[in-house]
Every structure is written in structure tokens, then in C-alpha cells.
Amino acid sequence: MRKKNALMWAVVIGTMISGLTACGLDMPKETKTSYETMTVKKQDITLPMKFSAKLKGQSDVTISPQVSGQLMRIAVAEGQRVSRGQVLFVIDSRNAQHEVEAARANLQAAQANLTAAQAQANSAKLEYESNKNLYDKKIVSSYMLENSRNSYNQAQAAVSQARASVSQAQSAVNRARVNLGFCTITAPVTGVIGEILVRPGDQVSPATQLTVLSGNTTMDAEFSVTEALIEAQVQSGLTESDRAKHIAELPEVTFVMKNGTEYPHKGRITSLTGVVDAATGSLGAKASFPNPDGHLFSGVQGTVVLPLEQKAVMVIPQAAVVRLQDKSLVYKVKPDNTATAVTVTTQDAGNGKDVIVTSGLNVGDKIVTVGANNVQEGEQVLFPEASKNEK
């Protein structure tokens, strides 16, 4: 019964096909379509050279006390932005105040001694001048004249000594005042407070690090420049002055955070160290970025992007390159419209869609782009368009 039904359906379908043919209707024909291709040519392209970098404030300052004592007060918080001259820490100033008072007392005593010495010197001078007049008139002896002269000289020496004592006492007062001022630690630059390493009540000394103040109005991104870039851009026979000019003419750079956020203010490369690291074949570089809003902080890591223009290079889509183990292949279209695989070397163009061909292709070559992964060696990849009025 089943065989009968199958045979019946075969007859019906055959009859339908015959009928359609008899009515002059053609069955659809398979049309082969061409692959997408392009002709290789040279063009200018801007390559985004990327370097891992770490930010550092141009004027990062380690804050340490100048005097020893007990820390009485911390006037700022971690991450707080401060202005130059703003109070940061306060050390117990009582001992320093006592030193100022003692130095002032010593100064007053020295000034009193000087006044007394000057008075004695004036009296000795008068006595000497009087004896000199009397000696000229033969009234007093030369012995009395010499005694009065010696007394006058001694009084002058005492005045000089008293003046030296006053000067020393004044220096002691100034030193004590400076030490008293050191008890209040202020910000040497405008910036942001880093980690505070002490607490109120701690004993501190000049060897104690209190915090780091990042002067972040301008930030330096420190990174290493690759050897290839050095050879191509820096070490091509440039003198020191030429190198400085070359650095100044480099394009502006961009700083990209680790989360992919691009910092809105552009920066410039400001320095390249003069010594190449033998281990890595690179040298250190710095790019400076303005930080007017204080959004950048020391220690932040990210990427410095330097756009370098490449002149007259062959650029092809990434889709045209077939990766086969350690080789990169591109299918070139021969004159008979068949494809042949050629090995190429490429460089990333940095835009996520193109590569730069450094060897393996020539200007004017036609290559397969879209669908290159499906091409077989010797396969015909270009076909003439079917005639629209085919009968």
C-alpha cells in the first residue's frame, strides 16, 4: 500500500513539472557570484602608537618635619586638594616657644652688657683725652697717660666683645623662631594629599615621612619608548638640538585610563632619556598633561597614545588576511580570475579594521577581501554578470 502511494505521488509531481514546462515557465538557474575584491594601493595613515604609562605629579613632595616632637594635629585628609601655604600638620610647639623666650632673655642681657660696655668705653675715652691734654701741658706723667690709654683700649675691646655677644644672641633668637615655625608644617606647593602615614600623638622627627603631596597642576606620564620607534624617530643621526626640536614637533598625545576612558586634555612628549636600556632596548620618556580640574592623580596607570603618520603604505582590511598557524595569507586574483595564496607580513594599523602590508604584495595587485576565509587555492573568484535579458 505504501509503495502504491509513493508511486502515485511521483507521477503527480512529474506531471506538474511537465505541465509547467509545457506552459513556457523556466526553472530557476544557479548563478555564481563574485567575491568582493580590492586593488592594492598606497596611502597615508595615522598609526596610534600605544605605551603603558604611570602618572606622577611634576612637583611631588615628600612631607617630613624639620624638628622633633609630638604630633598634635593633622589639619588635612587623604585625597584633599590643598593650596600652597595651607597648614597640613602641627607639632607640639611648647619646647620651641620656651627656646624662643630663653633666647630673647639672653639677647636682652647681651644688649644690656653692650650698653654698659659702651658707657665704660665713653668714660675711658674722656679720661684718656683729658690725660693727653694734661700731659701735653706737662701736668701729668707719661705713666698716667699710658694707663688711661690702656683702659680706653680695653673698654673698646669690651664693646666689641659685647657686640659679638649681641649678634650671637640675636642669631639664637632667629634660630629659635625658625624652629618654632617648623612646628607648623604648611604645603610647599598646590596639590593633593597622599596617604597619611602618622596619627595625632605620634612622636615624629626629621626622619619621619608624614605624607606625599602631589603637585598635580601638571602631571607627567612616564613610559618606555620601543626600540623600533627610537630607530625610526629619534636616533636617525639627530644631534642634541635636533632631537629637542624633533620632540617639540611630535604630535599631541592622549592619555587613556585603564577602564578605556580618554582624558579630555591633550598632552605633549617633553623628554626622552639619553641612555637606551640594554635589557629592553628602550628608553624612558615623559609626556606632560595639564590637570586644571585635579582629575589625574599620582600612581594612576593607563596608556599614552601617540598618533604617528605613516606616508605611502599599503593598507588592506583585516578580513583579507587569513591566519594559518604562524603564517598570514592573502588571496591574490590572477588574470584568469582564479585565486592564489601569497604569504604577507603585516603591521597592525591600530584602528581595529585594517593592517599595513610590509611585504608580499605590490601596488596594483587585486586581492579578495570579504570571504577570503572561504576561498580555495585555484578557485575562480570573479564571474561576469549574468545577462539580464538571457533567453
Image (tube, rainbow, N blue to C red):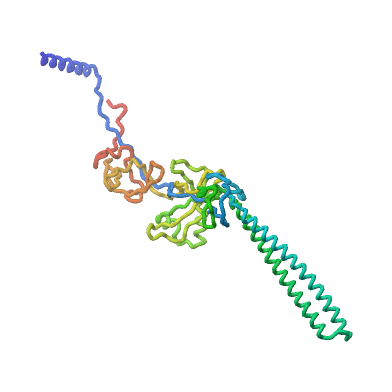
Residue 253 x/y as whole percent: 49, 48
State the count of labels.
0
Taking 135 as reference, is 195 above or below it? above
Q: Residue at x 59, y 50 (%)?
A: 90
- Taking the image as shown, residue 92 lies to the left or right of residue 369, namely right
Residue 197 x/y as whole percent: 50, 49
The foreground one among 305 and 234 is 305
Q: Quadrant of the C terminus?
A: top left
The foreground one among 244 and 117 is 117
- Taking the image as shown, residue 76 lies to the left or right of residue 359, namely right
Taking 210 as reference, is 144 above or below it? below
Residue 179 visible in the snapshot: yes
Q: Quadrant of residue 24?
A: top left
Q: Quadrant of residue 3?
A: top left
Residue 58 visible in the snapshot: no
Q: Quadrant of residue 163?
A: bottom right
Residue 162 x/y as whole percent: 72, 69
- Taking the image as shown, residue 366 lies to the left or right of residue 253, namely left
- Taking the image as shown, residue 205 lies to the left or right of residue 317, namely right
Residue 214 x/y as whole percent: 53, 50
Q: Residue at x 74, y 67 (%)?
A: 113
Q: Residue at x 80, y 80 (%)?
A: 148
Q: Quadrant of the N terminus?
A: top left
The foreground one among 51 and 169 is 169
Q: Residue at x 35, y 46 (%)?
A: 364
Which residue appears farthest toward the top when viewing the image?
A: 1
